[in-house]
Image (cartoon, rainbow, N blue to C red):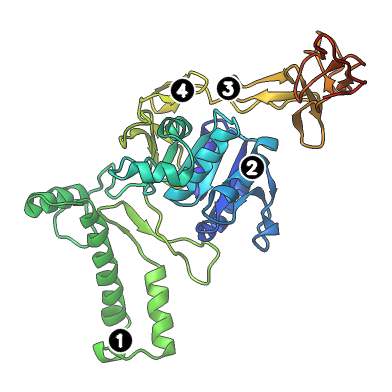
Amino acid sequence: PELMLKVAWELGFRQVAVILSSYGLGWLASAIRGVVAFGLSTVGLPLSLHVADAGIGGFYLSERSRSSAEVVARQFKQRPSRLAVILGYHNDYWYLGCALHAARVRGVIFMGLGWIRPVPILENSADVFAEAGCAKVALYEMLADSLYITTLLTRPTDVPRHACTTGLSPKNFEAQYLNNAQGGELLEYGATTADALCMWALALHKMLVQRSYTVKELNNMNKSTFEQFQQVLASTDFEGVTGRLKYRDQGFALPGPDPLAPVAIDQHQDPASEARVRLGTFSSGSAVQWTGYAVRSAAYNEVLSSAGGVLKGHLAEFKSCPPGVILNFSSNRCEPCAAGEVFDGSLPGCRKCMAGTALELAKPGEDLTNRTCSICPAGTFSIAGQASCSSCPSGTFSSAGSQ
């Protein structure tokens, strides 16, 4: 999650919405570090209402249900952000996407971890959409521009030597492994397995050879030996098939829990497909190298190209609307309330005029913060949300404010 916030900054966002699922609590600390490191602001309610010492604003999806997602959608509409960082799983995307669509929110770009695949191209997809509460086309519209931050399982560039092989570079080792594997599923996971074995081999070498522990002592560790072994593993630093394997301080007693690794930025540009476009790659502490594929947002017809690894331009944030007007999510413009509606600063947003009252569309230059619904005069009536009062049918009469 920390690296998701780095990508947010590179795309030009300075404000983000962190949507936290009860299933994603373990990622919150990393997201907070990213918010602080890149100087981003967050929208929403204090997450400390739900998680002690959270320290940032956001939205909390308390359970995987339509009602919980609808609460988040209402809160989000009042405090929107163009980029929504999702700390949750597949189902959380489905519920949130449907709830935001029903609330007439558009243009939001979801960002999540790459191994989570919320686009439900499944044989039982009808059940998925029924569970989430919207039609397939609605959910696909919300997921169309989603961004995913993916740890690369094999390094993009080579170095002269792998730490645990003789005469082989990491890329040469990878090629030899793929050739010997002779097909099969998920071959790329062999890279992480090879580096895990190398990490243990190097740690055992340090304990047995350099620090003179015996095999018996390692098989029957006391507290001191265990702590020594943990320190050795924490000091891991070598060039492997996945990249440079090195741990760092992440706020725990020992460095970890995950090693730093090259990261890729992918985007869904066809909402009806699982396929993703590789937009760029980077390592921690380095700038993103954009591949040349354009970053796209169908909602506002945005296309950001890149050249020489550098992105040109940035994605637009939602307009910040002054009191009296509201954000039209479909166009990203601030607009007055529709005829028959009045601005309500307590929401903030528009609400329909009550039955027995009416309000015409605002005139240019009119003070939009002090408009009120007018009571229908005697002989007229209205239902909720009318722009003007209707005359009573012939032979009938009504008092002022009639419905």
Q: Secondary structure at mark 2?
A: loop
- Residue 39 got which mark? 2
- Of the numbered discs 4 and 2, the one sitting upstream in the chain is 2
The residue tagged 4 is: 298
The residue tagged 3 is: 330
In the image, which is nearer the foreground, mark 1 or mark 2? 2
Q: Is residue 39 above or below residue 53?
A: above
Amino acid on which the number 1 mark rests in the picture:
Leu
Examine the rendering and report whether any part of residue 149 can be seen.
no
User: How much space separates mark 2 and mark 3, taking CA atoms?
Assistant: 28 Å
- Of the numbered discs 1 and 4, the one sitting upstream in the chain is 1
Examine the rendering and report whether any part of residue 270 can be seen.
yes
Amino acid on which the number 4 mark rests in the picture:
Ala
Q: Are marks 1 and 4 in contact (CB under 8 Å)?
A: no
Amino acid on which the number 3 mark rests in the picture:
Ser
The residue tagged 1 is: 218
Q: Secondary structure at mark 4?
A: loop
Front residue of 105 and 176: 105
What residue is rendered at 54% in x and 26% in y? 315
What residue is rendered at 14% in x and 47% in y? 175
Q: Is residue 12 left or right of residue 190?
A: right
